[in-house]
Structures are given as structure tokens and as C-alpha cells.
Amino acid sequence: MSAGYYGSYDVVVAGGGPAGIVAALAAAREGKRTVLIEKAGFVGGMMMLPLAVLGFLDEHGNQVVEGIPGWVFSELQREGFGSAHYPSPRHKSYTIIDPEPTKRVLLDMLDSSGVTVLLHTTVVGTVGGEGRLEGVVVHSKSGIDIITGQTFIDATGDGDLVASGGFGFSISPELQPATLIFRLGNVDFNTFQEWLVAHPEMYADTQFKPEHFTRRHFNLSGLKPLVDEAKKDGLELPISRVVCCTSMRDDEIVVNMTRETHVNGVNRDDLTRAEISSRRQIPLLEQFFW
């Protein structure tokens, strides 16, 4: 199949996650003709899981992330789709967002900044030679196209642009377990919150204290005694503690408790196995919560 020619840009950003969004907005702010290439039908990447976003505050509660990320979250908070930045004993800080409207806000910000966004488009190769990158090959429902540029930014999360260009990379022999995040609805939030405040012994082995659970939003990593008890009762849970956070909805929590080990994130078969196995773990975790 022959390749078409889509166009030439000052800056070509591969990947529309948080890093790619910030890179594209920064380039456009400097007057550079910028294209952002994203394989999904939206931008936001890992920020859309929708776990809490970490890292805006330091351990003293001072905001240490500003600039374009600060601008993005100010827009989300202004429209009611993002919480304040809350201090956390485990993660220094966390911020809750509502993923679906956030996708629209991010696309609006890119559009108003003059960034060309290509959704449902995947980088599948590169153009160049002698250690120099001159263009990328992309695939979409429209076919195969070449996009040339002056500067290329790999924000794919897996180094796809670097790998397809034949540049050096390495994969650690120690791989972090993969996790499929899910949302649990119909949660009696007030009862859950009151129980956490009344039972500090359930998270005594963590840095959390009752006062961390007295506000509307909180994140939690603990409750190991409850998990141990459930396992003794025969429930085959994949994790040793409860990991969850609140969402922007009053009766919903976001759960981070599925676990798949020995998963190479750039291996198709590993990813397929992990997707299937993780989804089978979710009903067990539902039993635990109910």
C-alpha cells in the first residue's frame, strides 16, 4: 500500500497523554506549527483511568507544579470537573477529575491553541536515516500517510517513536504489575467515610490518619486486616490491601486492586492475557466490597 503525504510541521508530537498535551501546548504557545498524533479517540491518556492525579503539592502542601499543567487544571476546576489539590501522606498530593468532560476540555484547549490533533491515528514507522528523524509514518482508517517535521517528541509512554526509528532502548527485567482500574458505583459514601474515621486500627500500618477521611475527597491505601480476613474466608483477592479513591460522583469510588504480574507492556500476547485475567478479578473484588 502506498503512503500519502499529510503535511509538514515544526513540531510533531506522538502520543496525546499528559506529556504529549503539555508538549503540544508549549510548542504552539511559542508559535510553532504543531501536530499531535493520538491512537485513541480522545486525549488524556493515563489521566483518564480515572485514578487521582498526583504530584501537584510537595510534602509541606506547597504547589510545586505550575505552568501549563497548572493552567490545564485551573480550567478543569473552573468548569467543575476537577477538585482542589489535596495533601496526602502517601502521595504528597492528589487531585480528582471527571474523565469524560475532561476529554472535551483538553481538546478545546488544544484546538484554541492552534494545535492540529489527529485522533484514531497510530505511528507505525519513521522516515529518515543516519541517525536523523525526518518524518513519521501513521496509520488510520484513511490509510497510511507520512508527516514530516523539524522536531519530534515521543510522548507515547512506551517509546514507540524511538523504537520504530531504530534508536536504542532497553526494557527492565523487573516489570511493574499491570492494573486494570474500575469504578464501583452505588457506594454509601457517608457510611464508608464514617467507618474509616471510626476504625483507625484498620490502617494503623500506613501513614493515613482519621482526619484524612473527613473531607469530601480522599484516597486510601490500607485496610490490610480486612483483606487478610477475606482471603481466610476463601476469597482469592489479587492484592494485599485496599487501594481506592473517591471520584467526582457522590456514590462512586475508583478501585486500583487488580494485579497481573510478568506483563510486558509492549507485548501483544502479554497485554491480551492481562486484559482477560484482570476482568475476571473484578467480580471477586466486587464481592469483597459488598
Image (cartoon, grey):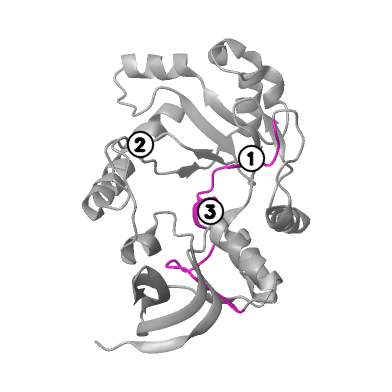
Residue in the picture at 46% in, 13% down: 225
Q: Which mark is residue 174?
A: none
Indicate the position of residue 112 as horizontal and vertical percent values.
70, 75
Q: Residues within 10 Å of mark 3 (few under 14, many from 20)?
A: some
Q: Residues within 10 Å of mark 1 (few under 14, many from 20)?
A: some
Residue in the picture at 44% in, 43% down: 181
Amino acid type, mark 1: Gly
Mark before the other along the chain sequence, 2 or 3: 3
Indicate whether 177 appears above or below 155: above
Q: Nearer the viewer, mark 1 or mark 3?
A: 1
Amino acid type, mark 2: Pro
Contact (Cβ within 8 Å) of mark 1 with mark 2? no
Mark before the other along the chain sequence, 1 or 2: 1
Amino acid type, mark 3: Met
Residue in the picture at 30% in, 53% down: 266
Q: Which mark is residue 48?
A: 3
Question: Where on the picture, by quarter, is residue 2?
Answer: bottom left
Identify the residue position indicated by label 1 in the image.
55
Please, what secondary structure does the residue beneath circle 2 have?
Answer: loop
Residue in the picture at 43% in, 73% down: 120
Indicate the position of residue 214 as horizontal and vertical percent values.
72, 26
Real-space CA distance between mark 1 and mark 3, rounded to the nearest whole angstrom:
16 Å
Residue reaching furthest left?
269
Real-space CA distance between mark 2 and mark 3, rounded to the nearest whole angstrom:
19 Å
Indicate whether 172 appears above or below 164: above
Question: Where on the picture, by quarter, is residue 105?
Answer: bottom right
Identify the residue position indicated by label 2 in the image.
177
